[in-house]
Image (tube, rainbow, N blue to C red):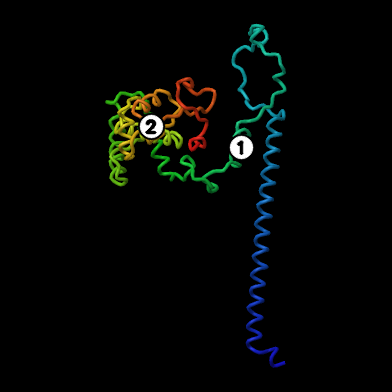
Amino acid sequence: MSDFFSPDFLFRNAILGGLGVALLCSVLGIYLVLRRLVQRQATTLVTTHLGALKLFAHGEPGVKLRALDVPAVEPARALAGAALRRDGLAALPQLSEFETVRHFTRLSKMNVSIDAAMYPLGSCTMKYNPKLHEDAARLAGFSRLHPYAAEGDVQGALELMWELERMLAEVSGMNRLTFQPAAGAHGEFTGLLLIRAYFDTTTGPKTAPESYERIAAALERSPGDVLFVSDVTAELDAARRAGMRCALCVRGPEARGQATGHAVIHGFDEVSS
């Protein structure tokens, strides 16, 4: 009996009992949370479906006009035959303004919103934007600017963009920046255009043989050691005049200039062969 009531035995059992109670509370808490979420979702669905049923049910007139203070006119007599609809307008649903607003507000709450949840994505258009920034972007000086406004009328906006560009250039170490791209894909395409413009500027036009000679020199290779692959025959012709080996990549029926005398490949897996 002394071992049964020893301090070590009581201490171990107290710890095990505490862990058991904590585990039970955790499981119960998870169950209650899941149950609440399921009930809330079911309630939302039922409420939404009932609202939709009410929306498409014939109810009270949505607009109540005051009594006429002029002689009444029969629409069938006042309107021409083609202008008078006869396809059962009386059966269309009617809701008051409050009922309509509440219905669509209830539907909007089913959407993922930054005010109600977290976006599990990293897209440029779905990141968190502080409300202060949203208010600033909606200032009339920005939101009401016309894209074709004269430069003299938008000096304030141009000054702000210039100062912001200088700040970002200092932080990033870049020479210039652009705020022209309006979305992620737009920005990626702009980057590709900048890369192409860089090589066109530093290497030369793609249709000039001298450009491909510079490419070979930059690679520290003779032009004959370089295999140039493209789907544009004008580029291939220029590279061949520079002494490079060339291959026309045919990527579909829309490929240009297949009958040019260049070797034809259908993918880069054929390059080694």
Front-lying residue, 49 or 175: 175
- At label 2, counting other C-alpha atoms closer than 10 Å, the crowd grade (few under 14, some 14-19, many 20 or more) is few
Query: x and y percent of residue 110 in the render?
Result: 61, 42
Position of 217 relative to 34 (above/below)? above
Relative to 197, residue 46 above or below: below
In the image, is 266 to the left or to the right of 60? left
Residue 30 x/y as whole percent: 65, 60
Depth check, front residue: 35 or 139: 35
Element marked by disc 1 = helix
Q: Which mark is residue 102?
A: 1
Residue 58: quarter of image: top right
Q: Is residue 2 left or right of residue 66?
A: right
Q: Please report the residue visible at 45 percent of the width from the left and 25 percent of the height from the top.
A: 262
Image depth: mark 2 or mark 1 in front: 2
List the residue tagged with mark 2: 193
The reply, left or right, for residue 193 in relation to residue 79 is left
Label whose residue precedes the other's in the sequence (2 or 1): 1
Mark 2 residue element: helix
Image quarter hosting the N terminus: bottom right
Residue at 37% from the left image edge and 31% from the top image edge = 244
Residue 129 screen position, x and y as percent: 44, 44
Whether residue 52 is situated above or below residue 13 in the rendered picture = above
Instruction: Tell me the distance, in whole angstroms, between the alpha carbons under discs 2 and 1.
Output: 48 Å
Amino acid type shown at disc 1? Arg
